[in-house]
Image (cartoon, rainbow, N blue to C red):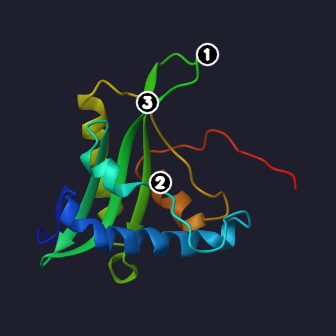
């Protein structure tokens, strides 16, 4: 992959494009989840995550244009698990024309480093089971299926 791709921490000036990414992510996930409310809807408080020391929001840019994003945030584990806290990854989005170039893998690698630097050896994320391309991408970087959440309506 070209070294022209730069992975860096997001700054508040990135917020407008990150808010657009969030809406694109929601639009892409709607077919997998009939329970997502109608617009307007938001998943994250991206601004708060950018300034929070217990979160790391990363972007990938090329030619000063942001083309990919992801975050890690420290979460408290359930009381019965063998770890007190873990790193939760989310907001994995890549502009369609830049998919398949390993950008999410680069973000995940940096988020793993950020997590390990904080003593967080447990790293988790959630993905819709039917989102096969995403599942395969996460498996490719070492994630394994762990639990299936089920629902009845």
- Among the 4 quarters of the image, the one containing residue 31: bottom right
Which residue does the numbered mark 2 point to in the structure image? 138
Secondary structure at badge 3 equals strand
Q: Residue furthest right?
A: 153
Instruction: Give the number of the mark in front: 2 or 3.
Output: 3
The CA distance from mark 3 to mark 1 is: 13 Å
Is residue 1 visible to us here?
Answer: no
| Depicted 9 relative to depicted 115: above or below | below
The CA distance from mark 2 to mark 3 is: 17 Å
Q: Which quarter of the figure is the C terminus placed in?
A: bottom right
Tell me residue 134's x, y (percent). 52, 62
3 or 1: tag closer to the N-terminus: 1
- What residue appears at the point 78 percent right and 47 percent down from the top-left corner? 150
Q: Which mark is residue 86?
A: 3
Q: Nearer the viewer, residue 121 or 74?
A: 74
| Depicted 77 relative to depicted 150: above or below | above
The CA distance from mark 1 to mark 2 is: 26 Å
1 or 2: tag closer to the N-terminus: 1
| Depicted 68 relative to depicted 88: above or below | below
| Depicted 82 relative to depicted 8: above or below | above
Tell me residue 141's x, y (percent). 40, 50
Tell me residue 125's x, y (percent). 50, 46
Left or right of 59 in this view: 85: right
Secondary structure at badge 2 equals helix
């Amino acid at each position: 992959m070209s070294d022209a791709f730069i992975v860096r921490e997001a700054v508040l000036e990135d917020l407008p494009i990150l808010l657009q990414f969030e809406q694109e992510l929601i639009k892409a996930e709607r077919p997998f989840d009939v329970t997502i409310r109608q617009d307007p809807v938001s998943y994250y408080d991206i601004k708060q995550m950018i300034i929070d020391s217990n979160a790391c929001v990363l972007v990938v840019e090329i030619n000063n244009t942001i083309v990919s994003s992801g975050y890690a945030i420290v979460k408290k584990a359930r009381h019965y698990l063998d770890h007190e806290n873990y790193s939760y990854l989310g907001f994995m989005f890549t502009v369609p024309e830049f998919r398949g170039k390993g950008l999410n893998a680069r973000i995940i690698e940096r988020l793993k480093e950020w997590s390990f630097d904080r003593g967080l050896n447990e790293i988790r994320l959630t993905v819709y089971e039917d989102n096969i391309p995403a599942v395969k991408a996460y498996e490719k970087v070492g994630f394994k299926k762990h639990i299936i959440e089920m629902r009845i309506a």
